[in-house]
Amino acid sequence: MPIREACHVALQRVHPSKHRLWKHAEARQNDKGGKPTAVLQIVSYGSELGNRGPTFDMDLSDFMDGDKPISYKQAREYFAQDPAQKWAAYVAGAILVLMTELGVKFEDSISMLVSSAVPEGKGVSSSASVEVASMSAIAAAHGLNIGSRDLALLCQKVENHIVGAPCGVMDQMASACGEANKLLAMICQPAEIVGLVEIPNHIRVWGVDSGIRHSVGGADYGSVRIGTFMGMKMIKSKASEELTEMSAAKGLNSDDVEQDDIELLKQEASLEYLCNLTPH
């Protein structure tokens, strides 16, 4: 369910020739020959609380390699150069994902203001709220009609591939599709909304800060996620191995008990999501 706190992003599109650049961005363009080109400028409120730079800017041409967008790996390396500027990947990354996944062309300069009241590092989806708010603002300003589910999946790509955090899609789905006073029922296979469940009026939900920091970009989270994929691979591999041995030894026309075993092994060999593994 969405919490009361939110992230707001304001965006302005400006023709490069009319864009008032920050002094160092202007100097950078002059070094390149002085012809106005599209620039992205971001201001982040509350940056002192998160130990990050308050501003970020880049030439949008940095996202291009000839006539194609740069790879997500290149973008991840680009934002990782300066730890104080890595936060910008959550915002600017939305532009590259739209270029790569939907073929959107960005010819105007873009100015963005990001203001978030969602507590950081508390496990309440602060990064997803920034991604969803940023991509929603970019889409609206450029006349893109993206459904909330698709928006969430695109935002997950920002975090997985450009930020480099191996998160699932629940946070982005809650931010993009959630409604006030309702629980979002969903199945992550990969991201299907089952429905919205009204929370009765007499029930209130409170979040209590434990003081323990939470990060889906941390090594522990990545290890657990990798472990689940390894576990699934091992189960599928073992099931395939046993199925082959059983087929070779007795043929597939065995009695009912063995037929049930064969069916179970077939299911396990073709398992796509670990949660679908039967209790057996």
Image (spheres, rainbow, N blue to C red):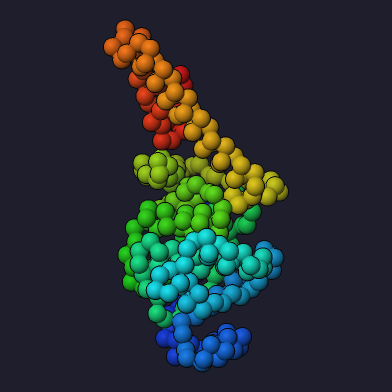
Write down the quadrant of residue 265 in the picture.
Answer: top left
Q: Is residue 18 visible?
A: no
Can you say whether 68 is above or below 28 in the image?
A: above
Can you say whether 123 is above or below 67 in the image?
A: above
Write down the quadrant of residue 55 in the picture.
Answer: bottom right
Residue ID at (51%, 68%): 92
Please state if 268 lies on the left or on the right of 49 as rendered. Answer: left
Please state if 87 lies on the left or on the right of 280 as rendered. Answer: right
Question: In the depicted view, which residue is nearer to us: 179 or 254?
Answer: 254
Question: In the depicted view, which residue is nearer to us: 143 or 84?
Answer: 84
Total numbered labels placed on residues in the image: 0
Can you say whether 210 is above or below 126 in the image?
A: above
Q: Is residue 177 visible?
A: yes
Q: Residue 169 at x, y = what percent?
A: 47, 49
Residue ID at (59%, 71%): 44
Q: Residue 223 at x, y = what percent?
A: 61, 42
Q: Residue 256 at x, y = what percent?
A: 32, 9
Question: In the depicted view, which residue is nearer to us: 216 or 184?
Answer: 216
Name, please, the residue furthest toward the top. Answer: 255
Residue ID at (47%, 91%): 35
Write down the quadrant of residue 258 in the picture.
Answer: top left
Can you say whether 134 is above or below 200 in the image?
A: below
